[in-house]
């Protein structure tokens, strides 16, 4: 077996042994594939990790940037109390429609609100509403805008909030300082912001599994 095959097989074993993939999540993947959405949702193991992070955080309000078919949305929303709220921002009307059905099937349509449009357009409108601060922000959309999303997350959170940035390793491409790829530049800028911003402390963790070799950044708002 290749390294990639072993990583995938272990993810499969973990998913099975720990009972991570239920009917609702299987339907999300099935419906997303049927609608032609790209297969880039978080894995079952990553989804459970996000849910547990939100639970450990005691999150009551969650912001997500990048909904796709709603897989990570559902994982995160499952951490919320009945009166909790998750706002998820999605550029594609088609993705949002698929996600809306999946979220309804999960019984989470009362806590989840999808806002359609470019996140850099919907974020200012969201901020104008002066929402209660978000306890957790999951950034998982167009990687070129990652530094802007981290800045917006800072505006919309409080001391103690947690920010997760997905896909910060990308097969190691992140270490290429001379890369002209906008996703690499955006991710490097987001990591630099986490490193240097006085209100943030953070780390980045490399991951392997069904999604190949990648990683995520975890930041905490300190003041
Ligand atoms: N979080 C999802 C995966 C998201 S994939 C999961 O793990 O299940 C990235 C999503 O971000 C795609 O649906 C894409 O349409 C959306 N996206 C891309 N650019 C965007 C933008 N500028 N604003 C909002 N969403 C965007
Ligand atoms: C891509 C985006 C993601 O959010 C992800 O988890 C994997 C891949 C992509 O745009 O290729
Ligand atoms: Mg992602």
Image: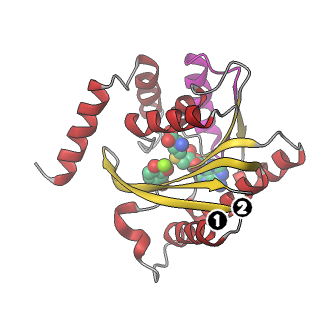
Is residue 145 visible in the rendered image? The answer is no
- Residue at the disc numbered 2: 151
Mark 2 lies on a secondary structure that is helix
**Which residue is depicted at the point 69% across and 18% down?**
82
18 above or below 149? above
Mark 1 lies on a secondary structure that is helix
Q: Which of 52 and 149 is in front in this view?
A: 52
- Residue at the disc numbered 1: 147
What is the CA distance from the residue labelled 2 to the residue labelled 1?
A: 6 Å
Q: Does the magenta stretch include residue 94?
A: yes
Neighbours of disc 2 within 10 Å: few (<14), some (14-19), many (20+): some
Measured as percent of width and height from the top left, residue 105 is found at 56, 17
Q: Does the magenta stretch include residue 102?
A: yes
On screen, residue 136 versus residue 26, left or right, reads right
Marks 2 and 1 close (CB-CB < 8 Å): yes
Q: Give the range drawn in magenta.
A: 87-112
**Which residue is depicted at the point 34% across and 63% down?**
171
Neighbours of disc 1 within 10 Å: few (<14), some (14-19), many (20+): many
Q: Which residue lies furthest to the left in this view?
A: 1
Residue 175 numbered tag: none
User: Cβ of disc 1 within 8 Å of ligand 1?
Assistant: no
**Which residue is depicted at the point 28% across and 38% down?**
11
150 above or below 102? below
**Which residue is depicted at the point 23% across and 46% down?**
7
Measured as percent of width and height from the top left, residue 83 is found at 74, 21
- Quadrant housing the C terminus: bottom right
154 above or below 129? below
Measured as percent of width and height from the top left, residue 46 is found at 42, 40
Q: Nearer the viewer, residue 202 or 43?
A: 202
On screen, residue 64 versus residue 39, left or right, reads right
């Amino acid at each position: 077996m290749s390294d990639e095959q072993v990583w995938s097989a272990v993810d499969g074993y973990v998913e099975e042994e720990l009972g991570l993939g239920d009917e609702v999540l299987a339907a999300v993947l099935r419906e997303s594939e049927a609608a032609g959405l790209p297969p880039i949702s978080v894995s079952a193991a990553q989804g459970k990790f996000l849910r547990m992070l939100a639970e450990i955080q005691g999150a009551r309000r969650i912001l997500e940037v990048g909904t796709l078919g709603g897989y990570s949305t559902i994982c995160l929303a499952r951490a919320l109390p009945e009166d909790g709220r998750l706002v998820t921002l999605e550029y594609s009307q088609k993705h949002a429609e698929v996600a809306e059905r999946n979220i309804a099937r999960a019984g989470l349509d009362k806590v989840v609100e999808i806002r359609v449009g470019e996140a850099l357009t919907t974020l200012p409108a969201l901020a104008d509403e002066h929402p209660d601060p978000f306890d957790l922000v999951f950034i998982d959309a167009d990687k070129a805008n990652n530094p802007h999303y981290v800045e917006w997350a800072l505006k919309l959170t409080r001391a103690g909030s947690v920010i997760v940035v997905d896909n910060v390793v990308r097969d190691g491409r992140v270490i290429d300082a001379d890369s002209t790829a906008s996703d690499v530049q955006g991710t490097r800028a987001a990591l630099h912001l986490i490193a240097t911003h006085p209100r943030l402390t953070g780390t980045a963790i490399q991951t392997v599994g069904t999604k190949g070799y990648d990683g995520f950044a975890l930041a905490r708002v300190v003041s």
